Image (tube, rainbow, N blue to C red):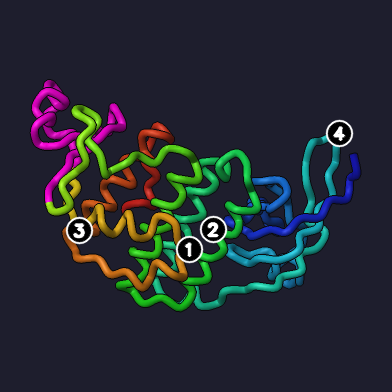
Amino acid sequence: MSRNLNFNAVCLRARLSGESNREAWFLCAEEGIIKATVFGGPKSKLRAQVASFHQGKLLVYHDPVKNSNKVTDFDVHTWRPGLGELYERVMAANSLAETVLATHAGGGAWSSAMKLAGDALDCLENADEKTCPRILLHFFWAWTEFLGIRPDPGHCSGCACEASPDGLIWYNPKEGNFYCGKCRGSAFAGSSGSDITVGAGARRWLSAVEKIWPKDAVRYSLDKISFEQARSLTLSVLTESLGRRLPLWDY
C-alpha cells in the first residue's frame, strides 16, 4: 500500500492539537472519513488551507507503523467564505458536518455522500437566516435515505391504508412506523407522549423534496407548524439510528 495518498475531500472539522498543530477530519470521495494531522504554526500556509468546509484535492502521508496520517498538501478549489458571515450559516454547516461524522459518512457510497454534503454547504453559503434551517432539514431528510433508515410517511403500518392527503398521521419512534388515527390508540398504548404528529403540509414537503438536491429544494416553502413537524420526525429517525441526539441539532 502506498504511503502517499490523495483524495477528493471536504474538511468537516479542524481543531487545535497542542500548541501549533491541528487535527482535521475529512470526508473523502474515495475513502470516507479520515483523520489527519496538520503540522505548522499560525503562519503556515497549509494550516490556513485546512479549515472547516474547504474542499479540494487532499494529499496525505500515511505512517503504517503509527497508523497515523499527516496532511502534506491541500489544494483548495472551494473555500466557502460566506459560511462564516452569518450565525445561522455557521451553526447549520457545523450541524451538517457533525451528522456526517457521527454516522461515519453512511459507511459507503462516499462520492455521493460528499456531493450531497457539498451541495448543501454551497446552498448555505449564501442563504439568509430563514432559509438555513430549511436547507439543513432537507439535508437531514436526504441523509436518512442515504443511511437507509427513512420511514414512509404515506402509509399506516397498522392497517396498511394510505394516509389521507389532508389528514394527520402519527410516528412511533421506537417502532419506526406510522399510524393513522384508527390504529393510533393500540399502537401507542403504554407509550403516551412519545408519538410525533405529522400533518399533511409536512408530508407534502418531505415528499416533494425527497428526490432532489438542496439547491433545488430551496424553492419549496414550508409553514412554521409543518416545518417543526417535519424536523421533529427527521431528527427522531436520526436519533433512533444513532442512539443519541447530537447537541448541534438544537442550535
Residue corresponding to mark 4: 65
197 lies left or right of 66: left
Left or right, 129 with reference to 160:
right
For this view, does 12 lie left or right of residue 240? Answer: right
Q: Which residue is mark 2?
A: 116
Asked if 55 appears above or below 167 in the picture, the reply is: below
The answer to whether marks 1 and 3 mark residues whose Cβ atoms lie closer than 8 Å is no
Mark 1 nearby-residue class (10 Å; few <14, some 14–19, many ≥20): some
Compared with 161, 26 (above or below) is: below
**In 3D space, how far apart are the residues under numbered discs 4 and 2 (Cα atoms)?**
34 Å
Instruction: Indicate the quadrant containing the N terminus: top left, top right, bottom left or bottom right.
Output: top right
The reply to whether dot 1 and dot 2 touch (C-beta < 8 Å) is yes
Mark 1 to mark 4 CA distance (whole Å): 41 Å
CA gap, disc 1 and disc 3:
20 Å
Are the two marked residues, 1 and 4, in contact with CB atoms closer than 8 angstroms? no
Q: Earlier in the sequence, mark 1 or mark 4?
A: 4
- Furthest-right residue in this view: 2
Q: Residues within 10 Å of mark 4 (few under 14, many from 20)?
A: few
Residue 10: % across, % down: 64, 60
In this view of the protein, which residue sits in the foreground, 129 or 174?
174
Quarter location, residue 187? top left
Q: In the rendered structure, which segment of residues is drawn in magenta?
A: 167-196
**Relative to residue 231, is residue 239 depicted above or below?**
above
Q: Look at the image and say whether residue 195 sits in the magenta stretch.
A: yes
Q: Is residue 85 magenta?
A: no
Task: Quadrant for the C terminus, please.
Answer: bottom left
Of callouts 1 and 2, the N-terminal one: 2
Dot 3 corresponds to which residue? 201
